[in-house]
Amino acid sequence: MKKFLATMLALAMIIAMLPAALADEALEPITVTVFRGDPGEQPTDDNKIYKMIEEEFGIKFEFEFLAGDLDETLGLKIANEDYPDLFDGGNSAELIENADALIDMLPYITEEGTPNLYKHIYTDNRVAQLLDEDGHLHIIPNYGINYNGQIQNAPSGPQFFLQKQVVAYNNYVVPKTLNEYFDLIERFLADNPTNADGNAYTGFAILCEDWRHFCLINPVQHLMGRPNDGEVIIDVNSGNWETTTFINQPYAKDYYKKLNEEFQKGLINKDTFVMNFDQYIAALSSGTILGMFDQAWDFGTATDALNAAKMYENNFVGMPLVYDESYGYGVIEEHYVNGTVMNKDRGFGISVNCQYPERMINLFENLLSDRWQKILQWGIEGEDYYVDENGRMLMTEEQYNQRSDANWKKANQALAIWESAPKKQGVQDDGNAWAPGDQAEMYFGFMNEYDIDFYAKLGVKVPGDLFDKTLELAPYGEAWEIDTTPIAVDKQDFEDIQDKRLPEMIMADPAEFDALWDAFVEEINPCAKVFSDFMQEEVLKLVELALGE
């Protein structure tokens, strides 16, 4: 008996010392339920990356993607405690955090047991920004943690966009102000009301659905020269970090009055205000939308679709517009591109219903290894990319182009996991880029002939050169990351009023606009004050924490 116990103890010690990936081989196969707070498509049954994960870790996935309103969907899940194992609450993840639907991951992460995750969140004391007030870590950011520096060929955040053919029509002069932008669209439409197939162009589209209403609301702060702080403007130069809502300010009225003018001219269709995300992507992919305000990551599927169809002239170039001096705000410097921001509270959490949290942590740990990051981001060496004699990771033109094919992605990439899981961005230790699209040889080497000519005529090397240099990140980060749950009712009122009244004003008779604006300001001011006062307090707390004051 003693011999048996000694043998079992020795075996247990050996298993404990095995790498996590090997130890998983002895575990029972499991099916992990996954919810993504964004629309998506199911991978194919024979997806090669998911097959590799199943073989190595004994894990299969059952995916549920968002269909409908995000907050309503999460509300139902919370009411019924219908929690998947891996839970991505999208842009409303605070709802599931505050409902205690997610476990605290911090106790599972140690320097010895999970070195990849430990380095990921503890380097530069990142973890301090990620914990809630109780010291819990519910979500490890899915984006925003760079290794060995940041690569910025093209900004992925907020911008005004125009089809490249519209800029070409303007003799390759990129608009710099709001008035120049709409003047150019008007001129292009006057000369080109339809495309070659006879389909009418739409001058400007506005996505208003659910949390993506930032396309309607957020342009104001950028026109005033500030980066993305969500729904407030913060004075970073005064020393007091004054935080105010911008939507009820005179400079916001200027933007919506401009949209009202463009609506009367036919540049904006009323259908845009009821368009859902899928319809919006379909419209962009058709090549008939000339311009919009959005964030580049938000419409990547449309970008891929246009490239796959070789409709390069219908694809978009971003630009950092500001108000010109005629608005009375002086000379405004643009600051669209902010320093790297961790995507706090965005990504996978592990739900309290998950029966195997250790295996989920182990999965994240292993997927964050260099080997698996290459698989998830580049694919299989020799099949999806190759390494040359200088150690550079490269692709053939065919390999590079297939990454824009939606059907290929469903069979050859694990996007539903990769997009929400912790990941490495920036530069590998050997100098290769983590993201294939950031690899210089491919970014320039496989640029289509249209874009090569287009950017040469713009006089820039990369799209990012159209923007001022990256702004130093403020000590509070970006204010959209602040959890507003304590004022949830007032915040919801604040958003609902905007979502209802702003489209009404844009479509109104111009003679009624001023009166409608005044009524809007009066209606929104009470909840705007609650919101701005709360945000002021939270910003000051974050500044104090960051600066050690």
Image (cartoon, grey):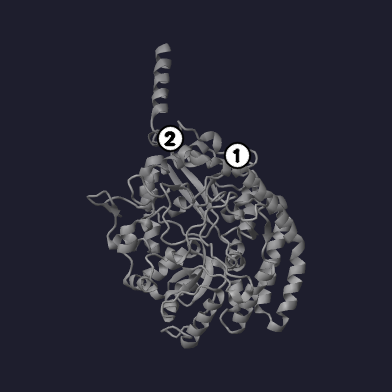
**Is 201 placed above or below 242 here?**
below
- The residue where tag 1 is placed is 136
- Give the quarter of the figure containing the N terminus: top left
Whole-percent x, y for residue 385 in the image: 29, 54
Q: Which of 397 and 343 is in front in this view?
A: 343
Residue 422 in sight here: yes
Instruction: Please tell me whether mark 1 sits on a helix, a strand or a loop.
Output: loop
Q: Which is more toward the observer, 205 or 357?
A: 205
Which numbered circle lies on residue 27? 2
Side of 152 relative to 75 (left or right): left
> The C terminus is located in which quarter?
top right
Are there few (<14), some (14-19), or many (20+) residues within 10 Å of tag 2? Answer: few
Is 455 located above or below residue 112 in the figure?
below
The mark nearer the N terminus, 1 or 2, is 2
Mark 1: amino acid = His
Q: How crowded is mark 1: few (under 14 residues within 10 Å), some or many (20 or more)?
A: some
Q: Quadrant of residue 313?
A: bottom left
| Label 2 residue SS | loop
Q: Reply above or below: 530 against 546.
A: below
Give x and y (percent) for residue 96. 62, 48
Q: How many labels does the image show?
A: 2
Q: Residue at x 34, y 52 (%)?
A: 379
The amino acid marked with disc number 2 is Leu
Residue 356 in sight from this viewpoint: no
Residue located at (32% from left, 63% from top): 444
Would you identify the image quadrant in which residue 293 lies?
bottom right
- Left or right: residue 1 versus residue 347 is left
Per the rendering, the mark at residue 90 is none
